[in-house]
Amino acid sequence: MNGEARTTTCCVVGGGPAGMMLALLLARSGIDVTVLEKHADFLRDFRGDTIHPSTLTLIEELGFLDELERIPHQVLRTLHADVNGEPLTVADLSALGGRHRCIHMMPQWDFLELLARKAGENPNFHIETCAEVVDLWMEGSRTAGVVYRQRGETKRLRADVTFACDGRGSVLRERVAARVLDLGAPMDVLWFRVPRHEGDPDEAFGVVRPGRMLILIDRGSYWQVGYLIPKGERDRVEARGLDEFRQRLAEMAPFFGDGRLAAVDSWEHVSGLRVQVNHLARWFYPGLLFLGDAAHAMSPIGGVGINLALQDAVAAANVLVEPLRQGRVRTVDLARVQARRWYPAAATQALQLLVQRRIIRRVLGGRVVRPPPWLPRVLALRPVRTLVARVVGSGIRPEHWHSAPAGS
């Protein structure tokens, strides 16, 4: 290895939503924290771009909501679907109480840049880019830090606690031989952009037809389009050709039939998401804690993955700031984070699995699915509207930042 090992109090592996929010909260609390991000920047497309009401509330608690709202974004208040010609309002966020009753659609890189900038206002925050963690640094059975590659050099970073926030493809899962409980998913998603024209629908919506499902999200100048396909079928979709692909899209969204689909002129413009739904049986090990997608990979249903990752980070900071200040973080302290956050993650995944089994699997299997006549009436009932809005907008057990600042 090249050079001497550096030392920090907390090493955060991965500069995604969980990692950057956790680093911000720890740095604000006077804890020395270093983020290792394997990419050179945050600029990657088709990541989760939803900022939910509970996140807006959190940012308001942290005091920089005005800065967040100055970032260009679209506002999403209702979720609609066209199910084989029958309109259905799935969720209406105006039913939420409180100030924030909408979802902000914002490029994730802009959100992460804001978190990094706010964290950087604290002298004990450090971020290393192009730093790919390749292994854990073990001392006996305890994680003492990480080994990472940066610009051709192999380096080590010692830490009192390492936080694995490295996503659903977590390398550190493999390094501790973590037991992953795979819950399965019947679909993958193809994401791409289509130009948006004046006169188009003005909010996100879904389209359901036998064998096909489409998600359209208004991003201002373009539609972010998600096309659901059966698990592992991308090669078969590509083999049928772009002409057939574009024809299917135009059949599902007729306003695309004006020639704008010519923008999808290469499969290189179509990004594939291999959907996973799984979670670790155990999130914590001596000196190591998994958070966000590294602990529980979520389906894209509801766009709630970011929300859960951020709430994991808040819970971890609330639980661990005092032990970190006192220099005595025990494994039982790390276990307390999982004890608080496993239920929200598991309950959310259970709801996603229900939608996958009862709707998505049937639709992609070619069945004609229609909402029962009573469903729109039930969804229109105020208690039901409120419950659905809370699950989508706030999640199960939303977290609030309550740790005192350093020196208080």
Image (cartoon, helix red, strand yellow):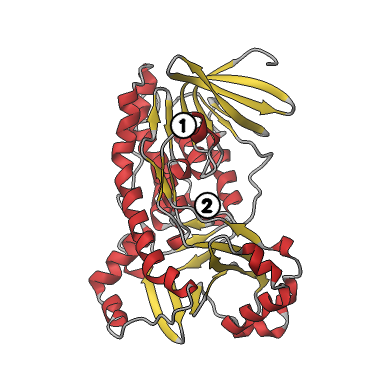
Question: On screen, 225 above or below 185?
Answer: below
- Quadrant where the image shows the C terminus: top left
Q: Residues within 10 Å of mark 2 (few under 14, many from 20)?
A: some
Observer-nearest residue: 362 or 294? 362
Q: Residues within 10 Å of mark 1 (few under 14, many from 20)?
A: few
Residue 156 sits in quarter? top right
Residue 301: x and y in percent read 44, 62
- Quadrant where the image shows the N terminus: top right
Observer-nearest residue: 51 or 267? 267
Q: Residue at x 30, y 79 (%)?
A: 375
Q: CA distance from mark 1 to mark 2?
A: 39 Å
Q: Is 376 on the left or on the right of 51, as rendered?
A: left
Residue 157: x and y in percent read 57, 20
Q: Is 338 on the left or on the right of 162, as rendered?
A: left
**Callout 1 amino acid:** Ala
Q: Is 292 on the left or on the right of 151, as rendered?
A: left
**Callout 2 amino acid:** Leu
- Residue at numbered disc 1: 177
The answer, for residue 221, to whether it is visible in the render is no
Residue 289: x and y in percent read 42, 31
- Say whether disc 1 or disc 2 marks the residue closer to the N-terminus: 2
Residue 200: x and y in percent read 59, 81
SS for tag 1?
loop
Q: Mark 1 or mark 2, which is nearer to you? A: 1
SS for tag 2?
helix
Q: Residue at x 43, y 39 (%)?
A: 291
Q: Which mark is residue 354?
A: none
- Residue at numbered disc 2: 68
Q: In the image as oriented, which residue stretches furthest toward the left? A: 383
